[in-house]
Amino acid sequence: MTDTAVNRPAVTGIDPRGPRFTASVTLAIFVLALLLSGPSPEAAAVLTGVQALFFAVGAGLGVQWTPTGLLFRSVIRPRLTPPADLEDPTPPRFAQAVGLVFAVVATIGFATGAVVLGQVFAGFAVVAAFLNAVFAFCLGCEMYLLGLRLTRRTA
């Protein structure tokens, strides 16, 4: 079965370890951006801009199609035992969209000299990525599920 709109295989579930790996890379990118933001806001803008592109792919196509998702699937996952369960890709995809907003605002802040704005939004992204990478708590996923519960309750 394929998704004919973009000619890629349809995904029914994703390995939950993939988004955690992606969150680890995201964490490293944002921490490096924060460290560089004082001496070189331009470098921080490049890093957060690259991360924004990763998030755009994840929000548009799914986290499994980001560069880190492809790396996980082709290099890391074959070395692991199969996951106990697969997870719905929709909440992580929503989380990628939320991350995209934070990365874009951080990039704009760093690129325009509003360094504190960039640092605040990059800092929020660090917290979210840390929670996912270390504790498997996806803040954006939880936002998605809460929104789903609230909209079902009011309908």
Image: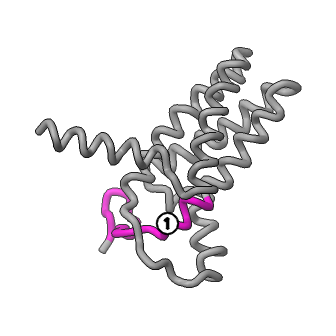
Count of marks, rendered view: 1
Residue at 51 percent of width and 49 percent of height: 57
Instruction: Between residue 97 and residue 135, name the one nearer to us.
Output: 135
Magenta highlight on residue 14: yes
- Find disc 1 in the rendering and name its residue: 16
Name the quadrant containing residue 119: top right
**The furthest residue to the left:** 155
Quadrant showing the C terminus? top left
**In the drawing, does residue 56 fall left or right of residue 106?**
left
- The amino acid sitting under disc 1 is Pro
Instruction: Between residue 61 and residue 134, name the one nearer to us.
Output: 134
Residue at 38 percent of width and 69 percent of height: 13
Name the quadrant containing residue 41: top right
Quadrant showing the N terminus? bottom left
Q: Which residues are magenta?
A: 2-21
Q: Residues within 10 Å of mark 1 (few under 14, many from 20)?
A: some
Residue 109 percent across, percent down from the top left: 66, 21
